[in-house]
Amino acid sequence: MKLGDELHGHMVQGHVDFVGTVKDVKKDGNSTILAIEFPLLFAKYLAFKGSVTVNGVSLTVSLLNEDTFEVSLIPKRSRRPT
């Protein structure tokens, strides 16, 4: 990116706290839902509707269980020509 480019979202920086395991992938209409298992030690850092970064992409936790969380991947709508 260069100065002046549009940013659709926000910047993410930090470090890796843990490596999760994708346990399930399911479709919900146009969306894809990933269920990711995480170490119980990190449960206190996750919150329903909180942010989590997966492979450098900031996502919202859409479901939180004891040892898994889900994120919903929603396709971006294409812009209509002006």
Image: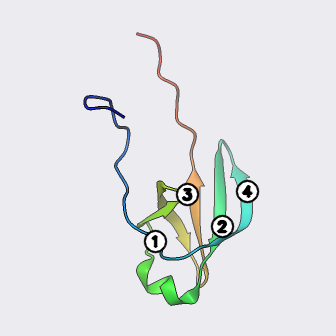
Callout 1: helix, strand or loop? loop
Question: Which one is earlier in the sequence, the residue at label 4 or at label 1?
Answer: 4
Snapshot quadrant of residue 22: bottom right
Tell me the residue at 59%/84% (across/down): 39
- Dot 2 corresponds to which residue? 35
> Which quadrant holds the N terminus?
top left
> Which quadrant holds the C terminus?
top left
Please tell me whether residue 11 is drawn above or below residue 40 in the rendered image: above
Callout 3: helix, strand or loop? loop
- Dot 3 corresponds to which residue? 55
**Picture disc at residue 6:** none
- Dot 4 corresponds to which residue? 26
Question: Which one is earlier in the sequence, the residue at label 1 or at label 3?
Answer: 1
How far apart, in angstroms, are the residues tagged by discs 2 and 4?
Answer: 9 Å
Amino acid type of disc 2? Ala
**Picture disc at residue 48:** 1
How far apart, in angstroms, are the residues tagged by discs 3 and 4?
Answer: 19 Å
Amino acid type of disc 3? Asn
Residue 72 % position (x, y): 57, 55
